[in-house]
Amino acid sequence: MDNPTRIRYITRNFDALQGLKMVPFGLYFLAMGAGWLGKQGDLSLSMPAFLLALLAYWLIGRYYRRNFGRVEPEKGRVVFNFLLPLMILLLLWAASYVDYSMRLPVSIFGLTLALVLFAWWWLQEPRNRVHYAVMAGLVALISLAPLGGIGEGWSIIQPPGNLFHLLVGVILVIGGILDHLVLIKSFPQGRTA
């Protein structure tokens, strides 16, 4: 990227590129999927683990502020940054409801998640975070796997199943690490300390 394009890209996507902040939540989901935090609904291990993930998120945020500084979001971007995750959650909830009520042979929830991941990659300029497109393809394949006789149809990645937690954990960990690498490579000297 040339210098003005790089500066515009970093400032516009600065929060999203702080990927290490997502890794603790990814590890939390992986631990849930592996069954290390007890049964679904048991808060004796899952609540302390979630609070630990929140603490790690905050500490990693301090690392980014100390080593990379801050970027003030554009005026209209503050509302967008709040509304976009809310709209995505509503869309995924609606897809989950369709899965549960219609019980189709594929996972609409998974296909919707794949679409969200693909859009996340496609709408970024430049499209250098290819890992989201790859993850979208993998989620779509898993969602369509029941057509090939693999899995249990609509519920293959439906929450609260283990595959759902493992999938979300992998997306957050891998996506977070790769986003962090994009941020580091966007700086001329690649500051890491």
Image (cartoon, rainbow, N blue to C red):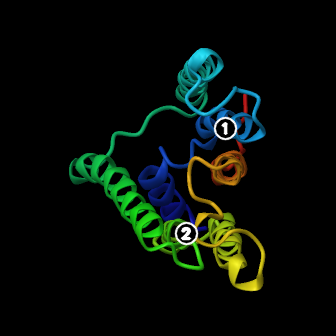
Q: Quick one: quadrant of the C terminus?
A: top right
Give 84 or 31, whichever is nearer the viewer. 31
Q: Residue at x 54, y 27 (%)?
A: 61
Q: Residue at x 28, y 52 (%)?
A: 83
Dot 2: what SS? helix
> What's the CA distance linking mark 2 and mark 1?
19 Å
Q: Residue at x 21, y 48 (%)?
A: 75
Q: Are marks 2 and 1 in contact (CB under 8 Å)?
A: no
Residue behind mark 2: 121
Residue behind mark 1: 23
Whole-percent x, y for residue 131 in the image:
69, 65
Q: Quick one: quadrant of the N terminus?
A: bottom right
Give 136 or 130, whichever is nearer the viewer. 136
Q: Residue at x 66, y 30 (%)?
A: 39
Callout in the foreground (2, 1): 1
Q: Quadrant of residue 189?
A: top right
Count of labels in the image: 2
Q: In the rendered view, does 24 fall on the left or right side of 73? A: right
